[in-house]
Image (tube, rainbow, N blue to C red):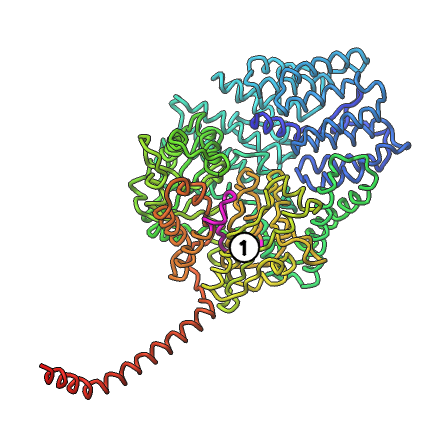
C-alpha cells in the first residue's frame, strides 16, 4: 500500500494541467481571455511552485486564495482551478480524508445538487480511493467519470487523456502492466497539449518495454520523453544527453535520466557491448543526481527538502546500483569511493542543509540586525504553523476565523523567501557558506577504521548495499534482500518496543530469536570475521533506523529454555554507536566543546497534576499518545547524576520549560528524565513534557520546532525514560523527531531511546553509563558496558531487550571531560582530613607503645 501511495503521490505532484471544461488550463497554449489579470498571475505562481516543488510557498499561496471561492466576481473556471489545486496539495501530502471532505464541501458549493453527477468529482474521488488502497472502487469511479463526461457534453480528448492516464497508473501500481500499456499508448494518440501526461506516458511505456526486453522500443520512447523537456535539442544518436542549459523542466529531466539509465542497464544484460552500455547508464544516473542537487539548492525551507527527498526515495540508490554493475565488470576501486559518496549524499541532506544554513547565518558576514530580522520571521512562521496545526486548518477550510491566520502564513512565507534571496545577493560569504557542504575526509575515516568498524547501509526498494570501512580498507557488498526483509525489521521493532505485550514465554522468545537472527545474517554475518571484537559505528538507512543492532542475535538454533540473559546479543561482542551520516559525524566532531564550568544540567519534571486533574489541558494530549504517569525512577536518576557530576539539578516544579529555555544553553551535558508526546505524522510537533502549569509564560510543552530554533551546543544530551529516538521515517533523512531537533540546535551527541523504557531500569543503566564517562571512555563503550553489566545482573523477564536495548548513542563518540560533583569533592577533602587524623593518632599511639609492652610482659611473667 505504501508503495502505491508513493507512486501516485509522485504523479499527482507532477500533474500541472487540470481541465475543468473543454478547454485546457495551466498549459503553454492556454486561453486566459476569460480571466482577470490577478487570476492569470495566480496561475503563473501556482505553476512555478508546482514545477519547482516549493511546497511551503505553494501551500501558503493556495491557503491565501482558498477563501476566494465564495467571491461573486470570480468565474466558475477560476474557482475550480483554485479548489482543485488545493485538493492536489492535500493528496500530495497524503491527507486523503481531508481531501475527500474538501471535494464534498467544495463540490456542493460550486455545483449544488449536480455535484454527484459531475465528472470531475468522480475523477478526483477515484484518486482518493486509490490512495487508500481501494483499486476496484477507483476503477469504477474512473469509468463513471468517463460516462458523466460524455453525458454532460464535456467530452474532449484532452479530458479523456487525463482519465486514461491515471487509470493506467492505477493498473500499473497494482502490478497490471499488461492492461496499463494500451491505455498509455492510447493517451499518446489523443489530441492533448498536456505535456506532463504525454511525457510520463512515454516514460511508463519505455519502462514496460524494458521489462519485456524490447530494448529498441524502450530507448525510443524514453528519448521521446526527453525531447519534451529539452528545447532546441536534436538527437544525433539515441545515446546523446541534452546539455543542462537546453532543459526547460529540470525537475522532469531528473526522472527521465534515471529511467534511461535503467534502460541502458537492462540493455547491458547479456550484451557483448555491456561495458559501454553500463558506462552510459552511470553517466545518465550521475547527471540526474547533479540535476537533483542543483534543484535542491534552490529551495528555501527544510520541509521542502524533506518533501523532495521523499518524492524521489531511490535516486541515489539507483545511482549506486549503476556503479555496482560497473564494478562487477571493471573491479576499479575508485568506483567504490564514488558509491560511498552517493550513499552519503543520500543521508540527512535536509538536516545538513539546516545546520549549514545556521552556520552561514551566524558565522559569516551577515550583520546582527539582519540576523535578528530573519530570526523574528522564522519564529513568527513557526508560531503560525503551530496554530494552524492545532486548529486543524487543513480540514476547517470554511472557518472564517482562520482567514487571518492563513493570510499571515502567506505573507510570512513570502517575506522569508525574499529575505533569503536578499541575504544571498548582499552577503557573498553567507551564500558561499550556505552551499558549502563539507565532504567527509576519507583519509580520516580510514584512520578511524583502525579503531572501529564503520558500517554504512543503503536500503533501496529491493537491494541492501553495505559499505564497510575497517583497518584502512573499504569493502562493498550488495544483494537482493527478498520480500521478508523489511517486514522482519518492523516485526522485530514491534516485539521489543512494547513492554505491555511481552508474554515472557519460550515460544515468544524463540520467535524473537528467529527474527533477530534473520536480520543478523543479512546485516552482520557477511563481515563477521572482519568486525570481530571491534567497536562499531553504524550508519543505518530507512527502516534500519528503527531497531537497535545491539539486540541482533548470532544464534540459528532456538534455545530449549526460557533465558533472555544468555542469548548471544551483538552488544556482548561489540561496542556500538550510531550516526546519521559520516558527513554529519565529521562536522559534529569539529564542534567546539563547552568549558568545564557549568558541566551538567539535569531535569526531572513532576507529573502529579496530570495524574489527578481530569480537566487539565494535558490529559487529551496524554491519552492521544503516551500515558503520562509518574516517573518514580526519574527523580532518583537525576539525583544520582547530581551526586556524580557538577552542575545544576532541577526537580518537580523547578523543572519547567521556561527554566530549560533560560539555562540549557550554558551547559555541556544535558540530562532530561521526562515524558514525551510523539507525533509520528507531524514530528515538528512532538513534545518534551515539562512540569505543567508552573509559569505563565510557557505551556510546559516544548515542540521539536522550538528546540531546533535554540542555540544549545551541548557536548552530550541524555534523554532517558522517553522514546526520544523515535519519530517519522523520511526517505534519506532517517528518523525525524525530537532527537533531530537537538542536533539542529548544535548538540554534538545524543543518548536517546527508541521507545519508552522503564524508568527503573533506566536508573541502573544510567548509573553505570556515567561511571564509564567519568573514566574517560567513549560514549559507545560506556553504554555498551552498562548494558552488559545490566544483562549479567538481571534475571527472568528483566533481561528482555525491551528493558535495555532501547538506549542508543548517536553522533560524536569521543569521551567527555566530566567534572565530578562539588559534593563529592567536599566528601573527598573531608575523607582525606579524617584519614590524616587517624594516621596521626596511630603514630602517637605507636610512640607510646614501647613503654607499655615491657611492663605488661613483666607482669605476665611474674604471675607464672
- The residue located at (51%, 27%) in the rendering is 239
* Residue at the image position 66 percent from the left and 44 percent from the top: 619
Horizontal and vertical percent for residue 230?
Answer: 62, 31
> Within the image, what quadrant is residue 644 found in?
bottom left
Q: Please, which residue is most extreme toward the front here?
A: 863
Q: Is residue 634 above or below residue 114?
A: below
Q: In the rendered structure, does residue 758 fall within the stretch colored magenta?
A: yes
Foreground of the two, 634 or 298: 634
Residue 273 is covered by the magenta coloring: no
In terms of depth relative to the viewer, which is nearer, 432 or 805? 805
Residue farthest left in this picture: 864
x then y, percent, for residue 175: 54, 18
Task: Give the residue at mark 1.
Answer: 672
Q: Name the quadrant containing residue 206.
A: top right
Q: Nearer the viewer, residue 282 or 149?
A: 149
Q: Residue at x 79, y 32 (%)?
A: 82
The tally of labels here is 1
Instruction: Give the SS element for disc 1.
Output: strand
Q: Quadrant of residue 481?
A: top left
> In this image, 684 relative to 525: left or right?
right
Horizontally, residue 122 falls left or right of residue 283, namely right
Q: Who is closer to the viewer here, 738 or 294?
A: 738
Q: Determine whether 375 is above or below 316 in the image.
A: below
Vertical placement of 483 versus 409: above or below?
A: above
Residue 312 visible in the shown view: yes
Question: x, y percentage for residue 633?
Answer: 50, 52
Residue 472 screen position, x and y as percent: 33, 49
Q: Which residues are magenta?
A: 745-762
Name the quadrant of the N terminus.
Answer: top right
- Dot 1 surroundings within 10 Å: few (below 14), some, or many (20 or more)? many
Amino acid at each position: 500500500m505504501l508503495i502505491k501511495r508513493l507512486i501516485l503521490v509522485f504523479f499527482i505532484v507532477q500533474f500541472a494541467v487540470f481541465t475543468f471544461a473543454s478547454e485546457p488550463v495551466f498549459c503553454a497554449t492556454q486561453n486566459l481571455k476569460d480571466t482577470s489579470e490577478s487570476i492569470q498571475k495566480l496561475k503563473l505562481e501556482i505553476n512555478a511552485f508546482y514545477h519547482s516543488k516549493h511546497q511551503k510557498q505553494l501551500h501558503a499561496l493556495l491557503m491565501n486564495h482558498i477563501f476566494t471561492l465564495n467571491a461573486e466576481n470570480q468565474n466558475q473556471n477560476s474557482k475550480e482551478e483554485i479548489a482543485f489545486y488545493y485538493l492536489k496539495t492535500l493528496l500530495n501530502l497524503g491527507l486523503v480524508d481531508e481531501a475527500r471532505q474538501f471535494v464534498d464541501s467544495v463540490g456542493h458549493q460550486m455545483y449544488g445538487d449536480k455535484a454527484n453527477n459531475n465528472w470531475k468529482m468522480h475523477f478526483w474521488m477515484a484518486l482518493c480511493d486509490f490512495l487508500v488502497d481501494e483499486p476496484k472502487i477507483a476503477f469504477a469511479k474512473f469509468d463513471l467519470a468517463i460516462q458523466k463526461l460524455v453525458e454532460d457534453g464535456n467530452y474532449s480528448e484532452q479530458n479523456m487523456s487525463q482519465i486514461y492516464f491515471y487509470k493506467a497508473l492505477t493498473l500499473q501500481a497494482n502490478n497490471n502492466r499488461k492492461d496499463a500499456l494500451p491505455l498509455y499508448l492510447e493517451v499518446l494518440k489523443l489530441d492533448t497539449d498536456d505535456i506532463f501526461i504525454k511525457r510520463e506516458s512515454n516514460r511508463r511505456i519505455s519502462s514496460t518495454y524494458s521489462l519485456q526486453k524490447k530494448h529498441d522500443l524502450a530507448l525510443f520512447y524514453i528519448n521521446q520523453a526527453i525531447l519534451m523537456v529539452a528545447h532546441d535539442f536534436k538527437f544525433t544518436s539515441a545515446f546523446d544527453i541534452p546539455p543542462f542549459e537546453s532543459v526547460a523542466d529540470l525537475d522532469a529531466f531528473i526522472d527521465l535520466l534515471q529511467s534511461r539509465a535503467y534502460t541502458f542497464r537492462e540493455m547491458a544484460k547479456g550484451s557483448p557491448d555491456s561495458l559501454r552500455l553500463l558506462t552510459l547508464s552511470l553517466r545518465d544516473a550521475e547527471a540526474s543526481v547533479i540535476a537533483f542537487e542543483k534543484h535542491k539548492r534552490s529551495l528555501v525551507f527544510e520541509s521542502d527538502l524533506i518533501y523532495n527527498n521523499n518524492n524521489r526515495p531511490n535516486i541515489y540508490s539507483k545511482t549506486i546500483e549503476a556503479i555496482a554493475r560497473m564494478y562487477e565488470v571493471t573491479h576499479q576501486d575508485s568506483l567504490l569511493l564514488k558509491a560511498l559518496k552517493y550513499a552519503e549524499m543520500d543521508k540527512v541532506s535536509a538536516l545538513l542543509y539546516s545546520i549549514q544554513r545556521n552556520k552561514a547565518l551566524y558565522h559569516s558576514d551577515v550583520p546582527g540586525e539582519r540576523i535578528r530580522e530573519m530570526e523574528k520571521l522564522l519564529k513568527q512562521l513557526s508560531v503560525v504553523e503551530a496554530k494552524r496545526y492545532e486548529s486543524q486548518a487543513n480540514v476547517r477550510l470554511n472557518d472564517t476565523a482562520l482567514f487571518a491566520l492563513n493570510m499571515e502564513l502567506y505573507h510570512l512565507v513570502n517575506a522569508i523567501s525574499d529575505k533569503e534571496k536578499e541575504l544571498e545577493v548582499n552577503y557573498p560569504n553567507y551564500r558561499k557558506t550556505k552551499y558549502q557542504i563539507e565532504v567527509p575526509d576519507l583519509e580520516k575515516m580510514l584512520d578511524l577504521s583502525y579503531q572501529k568498524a564503520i558500517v554504512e547501509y543503503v536500503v533501496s526498494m529491493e537491494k541492501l548495499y553495505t559499505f564497510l570501512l575497517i583497518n584502512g580498507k573499504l569493502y562493498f557488498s550488495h544483494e537482493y534482500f527478498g520480500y521478508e526483509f523489511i517486514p522482519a525489521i518492523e516485526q522485530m521493532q514491534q516485539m521489543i518496543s512494547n513492554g505491555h505485550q511481552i508474554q515472557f514465554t519460550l515460544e515468544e522468545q524463540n520467535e524473537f530469536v528467529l527474527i533477530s537472527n534473520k536480520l543478523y545474517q543479512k546485516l552482520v554475518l557477511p563481515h563477521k570475521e572482519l568486525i570481530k571484537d571491534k567497536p562499531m559505528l553504524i550508519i543505518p538507512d530507512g527502516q534500519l533506523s528503527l531497531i537497535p543492532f545491539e539486540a541482533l542475535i548470532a544464534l540459528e538454533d532456538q534455545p530449549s529454555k526460557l533465558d533472555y540473559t544468555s542469548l548471544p546479543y551483538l552488544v556482548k561482542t561489540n561496542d556500538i554507536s550510531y550516526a546519521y551520516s559520516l558527513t554529519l559525524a565529521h562536522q559534529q566532531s569539529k564542534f567546539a566543546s563547552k568549558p568545564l564550568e557549568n558541566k551538567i544540567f539535569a531535569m526531572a519534571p513532576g507529573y502529579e497534576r496530570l495524574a489527578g486533574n481530569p480537566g487539565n489541558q494535558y490529559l487529551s494530549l496524554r491519552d492521544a499518545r503516551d500515558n503520562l504517569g509518574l516517573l518514580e525512577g526519574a527523580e532518583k536518576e537525576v539525583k544520582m547524576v547530581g551526586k556524580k557530576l557538577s552542575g545544576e539539578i532541577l526537580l518537580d516544579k523547578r523543572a519547567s520549560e521556561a527554566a530549560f529555555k533560560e539555562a540549557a544553553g550554558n551547559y555541556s551535558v544535558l540530562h532530561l528524565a521526562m515524558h514525551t508526546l510523539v507525533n509520528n505524522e507531524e514530528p515538528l510537533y512532538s513534545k518534551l513534557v515539562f512540569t505543567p502549569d508552573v509559569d505563565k509564560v510557557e505551556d510546559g510543552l516544548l515542540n521539536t520546532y522550538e528546540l531546533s530554533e535554540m542555540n544549545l551546543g551541548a557536548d552530550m544530551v541524555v534523554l532517558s525514560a522517553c522514546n526520544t529516538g523515535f519519530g517519522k521515517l523520511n526517505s534519506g533523512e532517517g528518523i525525524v523527531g525530537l532527537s533531530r531537533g537537538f542536533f539542529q540546535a548544535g548538540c554534538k551527541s545524543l543518548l536517546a531511546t527508541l521507545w519508552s523504557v522503564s524508568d527503573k531500569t533506566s536508573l541502573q543503566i544510567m548509573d553505570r553509563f556515567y561511571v564509564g564517562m567519568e573514566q574517560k571512555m567513549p560514549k559507545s563503550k560506556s553504554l555498551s558496558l552498562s548494558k552488559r553489566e545490566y544483562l549479567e545482573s538481571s534475571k527472568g523477564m528483566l533481561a528482555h531487550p525491551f528493558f535495555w536495548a532501547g538506549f542508543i548513542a548517536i553522533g560524536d563518540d569521543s569521551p567527555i571531560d566530566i567534572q565530578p560533583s562539588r559534593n563529592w569533592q567536599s566528601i573527598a577533602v573531608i575523607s582525606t582530613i579524617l584519614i590524616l587524623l587517624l594516621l596521626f593518632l596511630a603514630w602517637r599511639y605507636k610512640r607510646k607503645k614501647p613503654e607499655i609492652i615491657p611492663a605488661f610482659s613483666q607482669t605476665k611473667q611474674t604471675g607464672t
